[in-house]
Image: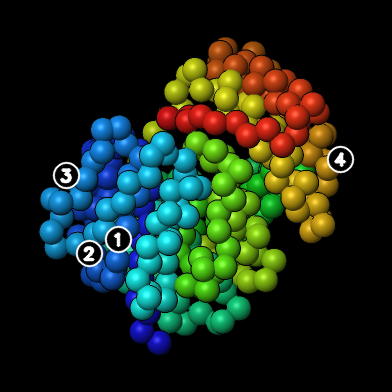
Amino acid sequence: MTHKIAFVVPTKDRVKDLRIMLSSLAVQTRIPEQIIIVDGSNPPIKFLCEEFTDLPIEYIREFPPSLSRQRNAGIAKLSNDITLAGYLDDDLELEKDAVEKMLDFWDRAETSYGGAAFSITNIDSPSGTKIKKWFGLDSTEQGKVLPSGWVSMLGNTDVTMDVDWLCGGVTIWRRKIVDTYPYDEWFQGTGFLEDVDFSFNVRENFKLALVAEAKVLHHQHPILPDRYYLLGKWQIVNRHYFVRKYSHRGLSIFRAWLSSLSVILLNIFTGIKGRDINRFRCALGNISGIWIAVLNKDQKIKGYLK
């Protein structure tokens, strides 16, 4: 089967990063059929898209920005002939044959596969610390969703593997998936765990794969120091929302509460050991998140980490 592929790229105030990402798409051995830039920048960055006249870019404006809403808005603009659609972060840089290698995977893939992710080469394959594993916060296996609602991370891989979830900004999906499964717009702003929520939902009926040969770099920005309090709240509130939503699939409310207490202790311990004020900010956010999860469990928390 000869697939036609489209990318949806939500962006916010990252002209330099987006230029690098689009430049890497412009030199691909296989150019995508459609690239949809969903701009939540202030001011708008339409001028940048107009620099890449050789790419099939469509520009749409979605303001104020919110990652889940931007992704849904982009998917609504897919051309009828697109058979694979994906989401790319604006701070990626694709290796020259990344799209071709991803399409090679889909040409071979069984119909049981619904989604696949590029392998991020500048993130080490995680192994999970003993203390985090003991508290149900991590695993030695990549890409696992744990009963507590925590996940083991996805890193560089030498072998294509099946996983439980996919990072939202490096994914490709069958057209029927994106037509059927919208991103949950309960997740606001940066959308912490919105990709776990989306992909774990798909995983109930379809397999997911991390594709070793399709490689990208992620020029990830550090979390701003004053946003660690927000991260701490999201670690509790968004995770409890996710666990409640999928408790029928083996996620445990009890383990989610146990992990909430564990992560507070872990952030305090890490802060003391490393003299890291950001871990204390995160712990304070955790405590605030527990109050929200108890008193107003469906509260949506807006904000951006970077």
The residue under label 4 is 254
Q: CA distance from mark 1 to mark 2?
A: 6 Å
C-alpha gap between disc 3 and disc 2: 15 Å
* 42 relative position to 64: left or right: left
Q: Which mark is residue 15?
A: none
Distance in Å between CA atoms under marks 4 and 3: 50 Å
Q: Is residue 279 above or below residue 167?
A: above
Residue under label 1: 35
Q: Mark 2 Cα within 10 Å, few/some/many (few <14, many 20+)?
A: some
Disc 3 crowd, CA 10 A, few/some/many (<14, 14-19, 20+)? few
| Gap in angstroms between the C-alphas marked 1 and 4 | 43 Å
Q: Position of residue 117 (x, y in %)?
A: 48, 61
Quadrant (top left/top right/bottom left/bottom right) for the N terminus: bottom left
Mark 1 and mark 2 lie on one chain; the one further toward the N terminus is 1
Q: For the residue labelled by badge 4, is the local secondary structure a helix, a strand or a loop?
A: helix
Q: Disc 4 marks which amino acid?
A: Phe
Residue highlighted by disc 3: 47
Residue corresponding to mark 2: 56
Q: Circles 1 and 2: CB distance less than 8 Å?
A: yes
Q: Residue at x 15, y 55 (%)?
A: 52
Q: Nearer the viewer, residue 255 or 18?
A: 18
Q: Secondary structure at mark 2?
A: loop
